Image (cartoon, helix red, strand yellow):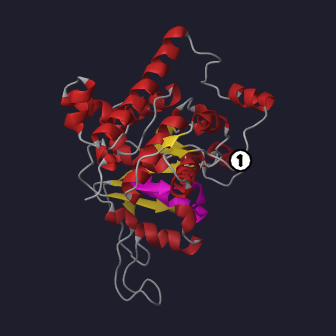
Amino acid sequence: MHKSFQAHGLIGESTAFIAMLSALERIAGFDATVLISGETGTGKELAARAIHYLGRRADKPFIPVNCGALPDHLIENELFGHGKGAYTDARESQAGLIAQAEGGTLFLDEVDALSPKAQVSLLRFLQDGQYRPLGSARPETADVRIVAASNMDLLQLVKEERFRADLHYRLNVMELDVPSLRERDNDAILLARHFIADAARTYKLPLRELHPDSLDWLLCQPWPGNVRELRNRIQREFLMSEGPVIRLQGSPLPAEGERRRQRDRRRAAPPTLNFNQAKQQALQEFERQHLIHLMRQSLGNVSQAARLAGKERRTLGKLLKKYCIEPSLFRQPR
């Protein structure tokens, strides 16, 4: 995985996720409007940020706004700003989010929540780059890339006349679909380990491992809240667990028949691993466990661990980064 994606929190190795990253990288290279779709908690804002920071506008502002969190009567004021005297309490002019995003990217999350009037105003801006602050007689111009996101089926909303068809076409110049966690093979395990390492760093606690029984449990869960739900669950279990091993509990494992049905619903998951795949998986697990053992033996001293392993320090350092193992977590406090 490209290191720039990891820097933006986009972590995964599944076929569906890598395909999404490939599309994202291409989209970032073109300065066009983007519509990001995906279930709640899949990481649509992370994808939007990556599109911005991997593109030519990276040194300009990235301004996110959750349209669903704004009262209907405030959306236009937030987007377009207002002039002095536009309404009773408007004692001075105020720039809107579009003006604040000048030269950069405006990310409209839950764009389906825009009121019909705000949809018309946004459509006009997308057509010619012009907008009119509330109470102003003069239109303003802005150079802003719009990236919108929704966990709703906008085409269905168009059919139900709850979202403008012409606005949908304007937003959907380039489309990015962020896959759900259910579609991402073994990424739940990879992400869980990443969140454990992150929690260990945040709370300055020793690194913990997942109990082998928890691996199957992770893959069998439906995760309706996707990556966000997984992150919150792992953080809670990390803080509440005692000892070096985390055993996920609470929701029981499905019965064997239900477990098979859940696995069958994973569109990208192969029914079995071939020999080479199984060998690679076993080698990766061995590498990770051995690295943790080396870190514990050396108390987080990478040079000493490299000598114990008979490897160059640089090579060992790359392996530690690959498996999200932070040496400082193994050092004894002074």
For residue 102, side relative to residue 158 (left or right): left
Quarter of the image that includes the C terminus: bottom left
Callout 1: SS:
loop
Q: Amino acid at mark 1?
A: Ser
**Residue at 59% of width from left, 55% of height from top?**
112
| 50 vs 255, nearest the viewer | 255
Q: Is residue 128 visible?
A: no
Q: How dense is the environment of label 1, judged by Cα within 10 Å: few (below 14), some, or many (20 and up)?
A: few
Does 125 lie within the magenta span? yes
Q: Which residues are magenta?
A: 106-129
Above or below, 178 relative to 285: below
Coordinates of residue 206 in the picture (x, y in percent): 40, 50
For residue 220, side relative to residue 309 (left or right): right
| 317 vs 182, nearest the viewer | 317
Coordinates of residue 227 in the picture (x, y in percent): 54, 46
**Residue at 26% of width from left, 43% of height from top?**
56
Picture quadrant where residue 21 is located: top left
Coordinates of residue 214 in the picture (x, y in percent): 61, 38
For residue 304, side relative to residue 280 (left or right): left
Does 119 lie within the magenta span? yes
| 315 vs 303, nearest the viewer | 303
Q: Is residue 272 visible?
A: yes
**Residue at 33% of width from left, 46% of height from top?**
330
Q: Which residue is mark 1?
A: 251
Coordinates of residue 4 in the picture (x, y in percent): 31, 39
